[in-house]
Structures are given as structure tokens and as C-alpha cells.
């Protein structure tokens, strides 16, 4: 993980250095550029400025564009806190919950009117019987054991062994 972070930082600084070299070369070429006329000056100068801004944005944020969220995932307060802290990669939702399709980006909220607590990429979506939830899945959802997760999913009612829930595998996106 440390090597990946160092590589990303090095690429960002190399991009910024190349932008600096491009700007210096642009100042040198600028003197003879006016001879070409106003329209080429506006088009090429606008394109060069756009590319410089795009490279600076990519080097500072680590990405060129940011996808818009395809929707919201409404979870309980504990699950929202676990996703926000990076401690949960699985979310268990009711079978009738509206969830974005896999591959899309979504906001995680504790209630429909609450502000987003995290931005996640939906990796996978599957159905699972509550009785079949394993200990590893419970830990990935931020629970110490599967029994506590099953009790939470039952919502204080008697647990039904044939109850089906949606299992949403997510990856928290970097806030930057």
C-alpha cells in the first residue's frame, strides 16, 4: 500500500513539473505566435489553457473527472458510521431497498434527509438468506459476530430463517 501511495505522489509531481516546462516553452513561443492571427491564438491558447488546468486538476486530486452519484444507499446509523470510518465493505439492506447498480457511485446516508456520510463505489450486489450470513461477512459489515448482525437485521422482531436481504459490497472512495 505504501508503494502505491508513493507512486501516485511521484506521478502527480512529474505531471506538475511537465506543466511547468510546458508553460515556460509557451512563453518562449508566445512572441512569434501573434503572427498567426487572432483566431488561431484564441483556439490554440484556449486549448492549451484547458489542458494545463486539466493536468493540474488531475495532479492535485488524483483523478481527471469525478462521477456523479447514481443514487443513495440508506442504512442505519451504525452501518453509516462503519462505512464512513472505512471499517465496513459490506452493507446488508432489506430486499425491497432501492440500490444503484454495480459499478456506479452512491452516497451513503443514515436517513433519507441526512447529509451523505460517505461516497462509495458499488462493487457487487447479491441476495442472501439471513441464516446464511457468515462470520467473515459480519466482520466485513463492521459487526463483531454474525449473531449481532442477524439480531439487528431482525429489528427486534423474531428472526425468520427464510428472510432474504440484499448484500451490497462497496468500496469507499477517497474524499479528495
Image (cartoon, helix red, strand yellow):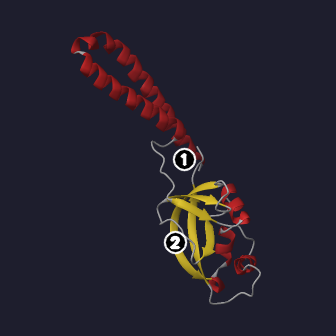
Rendered position, 14 above or below 81:
above
In the image, 159 versus 110, the foreground residue is 110
Specify whether 151 is left or right of 55: right
| Picture residue at 57% right of the left edge, 44% below the top | 5
Q: Quadrant of residue 135?
A: bottom right
Specify whether 155 is left or right of 137: right
Query: Could you say where residue 175 lies in the image, as x and y percent from the top left?
Result: 60, 47
Residue 125: which disc? 2
Q: Quadrant of residue 168?
A: bottom right
Rendered position, 51 above or below 138:
above
Q: Secondary structure at mark 1?
A: helix
Query: Could you say where residue 67 lies in the image, as x and y percent from the top left?
Result: 47, 50
Rendered position, 156 above or below 113:
below
Query: Could you say where residue 17 lies in the image, as x and y percent from the top left?
Result: 46, 26
In which quadrant of the rendered image does the C terminus lie?
A: top right
Rendered position, 159 above or below 145:
below
Query: In the orientation shown, which residue stands out farthest toward the left?
Result: 36
Query: In the orientation shown, which residue stands out farthest toward the front?
Result: 113
| Picture residue at 64% right of the left edge, 83% below the top | 130
Query: Could you say where residue 120 lies in the image, as x and y percent from the top left?
Result: 57, 57
Q: Are marks 2 and 1 in contact (CB under 8 Å)?
A: no
Read off the residue under disc 1: 4
How many angstroms separate mark 2 from mark 1 (CA)? 28 Å
Query: In the orientation shown, which residue stands out farthest toward the bottom?
Result: 161
Amino acid at each position: 500500500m505504501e508503494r502505491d501511495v508513493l507512486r501516485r505522489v511521484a506521478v502527480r509531481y512529474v505531471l506538475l513539473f511537465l506543466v511547468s516546462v510546458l508553460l515556460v516553452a509557451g512563453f518562449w513561443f508566445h512572441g512569434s505566435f501573434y503572427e498567426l492571427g487572432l483566431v488561431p491564438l484564441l483556439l490554440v491558447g484556449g486549448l492549451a489553457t484547458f489542458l494545463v488546468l486539466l493536468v493540474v486538476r488531475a495532479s492535485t486530486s488524483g483523478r481527471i473527472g469525478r462521477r456523479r452519484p447514481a443514487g443513495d444507499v440508506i442504512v442505519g446509523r451504525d452501518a453509516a458510521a462503519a462505512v464512513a470510518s472505512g471499517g465496513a465493505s459490506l452493507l446488508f439492506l432489506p430486499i425491497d431497498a432501492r440500490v444503484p447498480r454495480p459499478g456506479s457511485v452512491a452516497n451513503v446516508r443514515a436517513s433519507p434527509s441526512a447529509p451523505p456520510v460517505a461516497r462509495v463505489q458499488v462493487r457487487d450486489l447479491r441476495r442472501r438468506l439471513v441464516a446464511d450470513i457468515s462470520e467473515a461477512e459480519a466482520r466485513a459489515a463492521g459487526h463483531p459476530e454474525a449473531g449481532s448482525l442477524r439480531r439487528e437485521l431482525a429489528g427486534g422482531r423474531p428472526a425468520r430463517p427464510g428472510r432474504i436481504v440484499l448484500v451490497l459490497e462497496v468500496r469507499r472512495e477517497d474524499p479528495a
